[in-house]
Image (cartoon, rainbow, N blue to C red):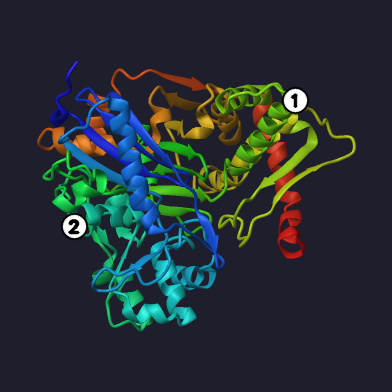
Amino acid sequence: MSINYKNTVLGIEFGSTRIKATLIDTEHKPIASGGYEWENSFVNGVWTYDLADAVKGLRECYADLVKNLGEAPETFGAIGISGMMHGYLPFDSDWNQIAEFRTWRNTITGEAAEKLTEKFGFNIPQRWSIAHVYQAILNGEEHIKKLAHVTTLAGYIHYLCTGVNAVGMNEGSGMFPVDSASLTYNREMLEKFDSISGLDVKAADFLPELLTAGKSAGVLTAEGAKLFDPTGTLKPGVPMAPPEGDAGTGMVATNSVRVRTGNVSAGTSDFSMLVLDHELGVHREIDVFNTPAGLPVAMVHCNNCTSDINAWVNLFGEFAQLIGAPVSKGELFTKLFNKALEGDADCGDLLSYNYFSGEGVTDIDEGRLIFARKPDSAFTLANFMRTHLVSALATLKLGMDILSKVENVPCDKMTGHGGYFKTPGVGQRILSAAINAPVTVTETAGEGGPYGMALLAAFMLWKDEGETLEDYLDNKVFAGAKSSTVMASEEEVKGFAAFAESYKNAFEIERLATKLF
């Protein structure tokens, strides 16, 4: 059946390991998807991606979508770009890149983050763009004299596609603190930054424009259309939604943008988001962001989640190949994840640290991947896999405990999405054990960020006058959505707590490893 592409919207997300496109129809159902795998590099002590690879990835991802559609569209109703939040992408006045792209994964801005947090009276995480700017100033880096623009990966791709230098509210709130009342960058903090920066350019001038969900962020230019499709089939003029961060698209994809709702996104990194009903104190482990519509959100962001799990699964895959019984990666993940549910609730006294890179929550600048056991630990495959699945959420639990036990932040609904939840019921049950609360996964949770970005583009295109993002999602997108909710047993909750206690008590192992190995 022929598709009227003007009645479709396209979301594309630049994730840590995969660039993915999702095309949806007027019923908000996915029609087709495309993907392209890529990976960061560790160059001169910095986690980075080459922006040429980002452009190539956009093109290859779109080509894969076209291949899966079986035809090349000439237009869409709207397009939205999202990507990894935070980090540092600096440019001069002519938009020439003046330093390498420093991603969210870097933990090299500790001095700047600490000083800005004290100056602002507001927690500034190491991965935020303004922390990178100030650290470059403190370091006396030569490029900082040329600074005219700072943006994010999604913001940069959007600029290439439209010529518009703007980001969505969630993305922008990961660059610099946002005033939730005025929906602008916090004016008082802008002035405080300018008073100590020593730069000729003011922060308000080098930061991109902020746009709330539903607003127009320009249209696809002729140059932008060629970025997607060098064949020239895709025509310019497609409306573009404000580019967003992966945290915001995750909130949208799980319908977690209303006050007292939350979600956990778990993949290469993991983070929780809880829409707040009251202001918080300053906690180094808790970031305060905004939803794409501008509501304040508490976020616990962890740099490390599934990378260590992936490495072990790959190792098991090599073994299967060696003994002449090759198994597809998807089947291997499913079998091993389900095996983890057979393990002891406390993981049989096994322990692991999944720190592929540094971790801001626990204030550690480098990562070491550690597995440890006692001579009398219950060393079984089930406990081994459960240990790694639990370890993947252990740092997240540290921050979540502050929200629930110290700040008394209420949560009516917690939803999970991302690769960690792909095997039905497994990650869901372990997260429930971590937070001692029911966890819901919807049928579209596997679509993740690009689906959330497509929904934001749909909201811009198809919302009724005066309709809020919260109402649009409740009434038009998720009203009939299928979902499953799981609550961990009391034994599982206690088991996770026991593991977490061992994890904290033995953390010096991780610190020593970064110094000695």
At a point 29% along the width and 53% down the height, the residue shown is: 157
Q: Where's residue 58, x and y in %?
A: 33, 46
Q: Is residue 76 above or below residue 291?
A: above
Q: Tell me the quadrant of the picture where the C terminus can be found.
A: bottom right
At a point 25% along the width and 36% down the height, the residue shown is: 10
Residue 257 circle label: none
Along the line of sight, the residue nearer the viewer: 291 or 407: 291
Residue 164 circle label: 2
Residue 397, quarter of picture: top right
Which element carries disc 1, helix, strand or loop? Answer: loop
Residue 312, quarter of picture: top right
Q: How would you rate the neighbour count of disc 2 (Cα within 10 Å): few for under 14, some for 14-19, many for 20 or more?
A: some
Foreground: disc 2 or disc 1:
1
Query: Does residue 193 show up?
Result: yes
Q: Tell me the quadrant of the picture where the N terminus can be found.
A: top left
Relative side of 466 to 481, left or right: left
Residue type highlighted by circle 2:
Val
Q: Where's residue 438, x and y in %?
A: 51, 26
Q: Residue furthest front?
A: 231
Q: Is residue 287 above or below residue 236?
A: below
Q: Where's residue 326, x and y in %?
A: 65, 24
At a point 56% along the width and 29% down the height, the residue shown is: 427
Residue 194, quarter of picture: bottom left
Along the line of sight, the residue nearer the viewer: 403 or 236: 236
For marks 2 and 1, the one nearer the N-term is 2
Query: Does residue 258 show up?
Result: no
Along the line of sight, the residue nearer the viewer: 433 or 221: 221
Residue type highlighted by circle 1:
Ile
Q: How would you rate the neighbour count of disc 1 (Cα within 10 Å): few for under 14, some for 14-19, many for 20 or more?
A: few
Relative side of 445 to 2, left or right: right
Q: Where's residue 265, x and y in %?
A: 46, 39
User: Which residue is identified by label 1?
Assistant: 323
